[in-house]
Image (cartoon, grey):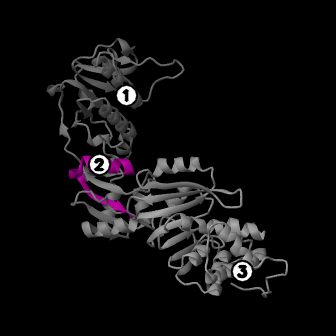
Amino acid sequence: MARKSRQTHTPADEPAIDSMQALLRGCGLRLDQQQLKCLWMYHGLLREYNPILNLTRVRNFKNMVLKLYADSLLPADMLELPSPLLDLGTGPGMPGIPLKIYQPQLEIILAESRKKRADFLQLAIDQIKLTGIRVLAGRITGRFEEPVAGVITRAVETIERTLERISGCLDTNGRVIFLKGPHCDAEIAAAGSRFHDTYEQVVDQPYTIPHTRLQRRLLVYRRMDAPLFRRRAKALAAYAVRTISSAQNPLFKQWRKLLTGRGVRKLGQALVAGAKPVSETLARSPQHCQAWISCDEPPPDDGPLHLKWFRLAPALFNQLDIFGTRSPLLLITLPDIRPWEPLEGFPPGCSVLIPFQNPENVGAAIRSAAAFDTAQVILLAESAHPFHPRALRASGGSVLRVVLRQGPALERLPVGLPVIALSAGGSDIRRAIFPPSFGLLAGMEGPGLSVAWRRHAVGIPISAAVESLNAAAAVAVALYEWKRKSTGGKS
């Protein structure tokens, strides 16, 4: 960085190096003469450049020594620091530079996004002649993948946000060290709720900086999972992987067709979206899983070994990720959907007959069918495909957990079947008697049911201010009432 003309920075009334030494010793910190000399040089540079770079608002000598330098050094006496250690949001170089002076064996990376401050850090390193420490000028995000054993920060950013940002670089069993104020319980709770599977809190130690009223809290988290670069390397060794970067790629063009019900029906495949549905599908139906499609995220360690891994350019992946989940997609083959004819009748329990043309209604109805343990779901000819992306998403993955049958058109259903039809003008469903084996039929969106079905239909009592319930919602309420009665009134 460009330096202003330097002046001697030790006016007669400013305390000398022995004053710094006395204050540090009062905190239990003992630096040898070379370390003390280096810290004094750093102090001089900080004082010299602070007026033009606004490096710190702490300007009183005693406060600088206690609230800046001692605060940076005390954690080194309270725990063993990992190396390499990333000082996240280091600002003017704290705690990284004082720690490097105090424990020279540490390898330290100073991460600072503001260019002028990054230039100051490099100047300080060069002037003090420190080795094994470097400046990383730029913002750290989850995409930063240089392996580090630890992260330390005095920054005011929340614990949750920091854990998210270092997800790409902190190695397994790595430590995250937070130098916090005393009132951070809400942050701890939020981080614990979100990262309970990936980070374990191992230290929570309150302390006070000696000779001040400044209360501090030392928090340390241990990473339990593996960062992306480790998982990627492992997956590359375990799975067949292929990179696709062109929209003209035949496979990509084929997958784009799976965004419509017609493409799903023609190709016999579907795309599962969303971290939870994908995870559940891999666990419960590995035989249907064909390929893992992502930008960079590797398949899980316990995924089926026959799974192929396709790495897509972000622009291509975004075209397939129509719900904006930003998590990998799973390509699956469709289960066998056997035909059902009215002459077959119904097995014991409830069979849900679905004529819905809206894929989301189809998925929601299937989810309700799974929730209430129905015998089967019969998709009438009018129905949207149950593996349409919107149906899959609305089903929450339940579509792979129910028995699916392919039925005839609604008009071909004989009126004499043991069917309980749902209609807005039907008799109160609370007085309905559900047969041991029956079909539950809701009308299509808009047209509803034919006159023949409406004559004996049941309805769900609702406010007169609302004309009718959503078709899938009506199915859910009717299934609840059936389940309640079939279990002796216990829902």
Residue type indicated by callout 2:
Thr
Q: Residue 277 in the image: x percent, y percent?
A: 35, 47
> Disc 1 and disc 3: Cα gap in Å?
70 Å
Front residue of this view, candidates 112 and 487? 112
- The image's mark for residue 45 is 3
SS assignment at label 2? helix
Q: Quadrant of residue 10?
A: bottom right
Q: Is residue 308 magenta?
A: no
Q: CA distance from mark 2 to mark 1?
A: 23 Å
Please tell me whether residue 462 is drawn above or below residue 33 in the rendered image: above
Magenta includes 283? yes
Residue numbers of the magenta segment: 273-297
Q: Of the two numbered discs 2 and 1 on the same chain, state the one appearing first in sequence.
A: 2
> Along the horizontal axis of the image, is 328 left or right of 7?
left
Left or right of residue 330, residue 212 in this image: right
Task: Check disc 3 and give the amino acid type.
Answer: Leu
Q: Which residue is mark 2?
A: 281
Q: Which mark is residue 476?
A: 1
Query: How many numbered marks are there?
Result: 3
Residue at 57% x, 50% y is: 187
Q: Are marks 3 and 2 in contact (CB under 8 Å)?
A: no
Q: Quadrant of residue 219?
A: bottom right
Tell me residue 280's x, y (percent).
Answer: 31, 47
Q: Earlier in the sequence, mark 1 or mark 3?
A: 3
Return the residue nearer the eye: 155 or 75.
Answer: 75
Q: Position of residue 293 (x, y in %)?
A: 34, 60
In the image, residue 327 sits, relative to residue 296, either above or below, namely above
